[in-house]
Amino acid sequence: MDNFNFYSPTEFVFGRDRAEETGRYVNKHGGTKVLIHYGGGSAVKSGLIDIVKKSLGDADIAYCELGGVKPNPRDTLVYKGIELCRKEGVDFILAVGGGSVIDSSKAIALGVPYDGDFWDFYSGKTPEKALPVGTVLTIAAAGSEGSGNSIITKEDGLLKRGARNDILRPRFSIMDPALTQTLPAYQTACGATDIMAHVFERYFTNTREVEITDRLCEAVLLTMIKETPRVIADPDNYDARANIMWAGMVAHNNICGVGRQQDWNSHGLEHELSALYDVTHGAGLAVIMPAWMEYVHDHNVLRFCQMATRVFGCRMYFEDPESTALEGIRRFRSFLHSIGMPINFEELGAKEEDIPKLVEKLGIGEGTRAGFMELNAEDVAGIYRIAAHASLQGMEE
Ligand code: NZQ
Ligand code: ZN
């Protein structure tokens, strides 16, 4: 196992009606003037924003607000948020929504105390300062409620890029599973796919002797396989929602990834799809992740056999490990299809003729992308091509 530091300072406030306590937690974490940042309206419609405002009011905390965050959040709104915070003297950003709202909040938090362009931090500069961020989560998916990451799309050139630093980890995250009951089934399934992908990006590693994190990863995956169909069939199932919500946090605050090399290539390849076509991140991953698995399985077929047997209940064919590995991948794709996810470019709304453009935007040039298996530009094109043509043919559904 590799050396590691694990710093996860976020206070998680989990359970029914906990959003009513928002003011108390802002207060506890030092906020006196808050920006309430939210998305396209779901949190207004559900009454959540009113609950949050009342709670802030009860705690005598002043606030201003900025809605309108789009999925795959844009830099343009971040600039508006920075300006507003400076004008209003905001000292705490409260994200009320999903990963997009949280990531936009983190970007504003970076930009307010910084003299230059906040985009510098999405182009490789290490941040040193950020305003504190708290979240009231409304969708189990990106894991931004516990992560030190933020992903923003620059409208000019459609570049989707990330910043990562522990100072971006939220001070607190309020997680009421009941808030996710209003999600359309498609968004629930996209979120579930993203959660599983966050685990797989850590599970496929070249580091040996990482039993504890392997087993944690498998626990999250098995939970998702059990609970996702339950919430798709019964959106009001609080307990299944609760398990998924916590799984989403555990999948991405890095407790499943410490001490091991990780592979974020599926996410990298997906971000080019969501940048170019504005598709939902989880849907893009449903198309990319099994294609990536197919392409790289030879690199360590036994690791794929481990996934196939422990996570997808496949029989191990000792005389033919490859067929066990491929069966595991088939079952993963079949599972994604069963929860309503697209499995190829056509179903996603992507175009095969754009593959050269997608590859170019990744900027690999003559080099490679590190990971479980190093990928050059030709490898990446190969993965996109598998994704373009994937089908369930010959698979049990
Ligand atoms: O904008 P509103 O009206 O709120 O609608 C949202 C949005 O349309 C809706 N929604 C959210 N909660 C709802 C709801 N609708 C009804 N009821 C509710 N309770 O769902 C849609 C998707 O929301 P979004 O915030 O975009 O979802 P998600 O949490 O999946 O976030 C996706 C973004 O996170 C990034 C992705 O790339 C993408 O930009 N990621 C961020 C990560 C991080 N910061 O650590 C890691 C991830 O790998 C990911 O890349
Ligand atoms: Zn993701």
Image (cartoon, rainbow, N blue to C red):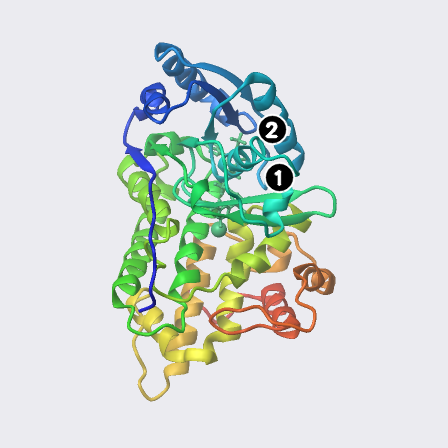
Residue drawn at 68 percent across, 60 percent down: 358
**Where in the figure is residue 201, as x and y percent of width and height?**
44, 61
Q: Nearer the viewer, residue 391 or 213?
A: 213
Instruction: From the image, tell me which residue sits under label 2.
Output: 82
What is the quadrant of residue 68 in the picture?
top right
Residue 392 visible in image: no
Q: Which mark is residue 312?
A: none
CA separation in Å, label 1 and label 2 = 9 Å
What residue is at 70 percent from the left and 69 percent from the top?
Answer: 365
Residue 233 spot, x, y in % from top left: 36, 42
Which kind of residue does numbered mark 2 sit on?
Answer: Ile
Residue 114 is situated, as x and y percent measured from the top left of the image, at 59, 35
Q: Quadrant of residue 83?
A: top right
Q: Secondary structure at mark 2?
A: helix
Q: Which mark is residue 118?
A: 1
Tell me: residue 164, above or below residue 385. Answer: above
Residue 213 position, x and y percent, is 29, 62
Are the residues flagged by discs 1 and 2 in contact, CB closer than 8 Å? yes
Left or right placement of residue 77 versus residue 58 in this view = right
**Quarter of the image containing the C terminus?**
bottom left
Q: Does residue 391 appear to the left or right of 354 in the view shown?
A: left
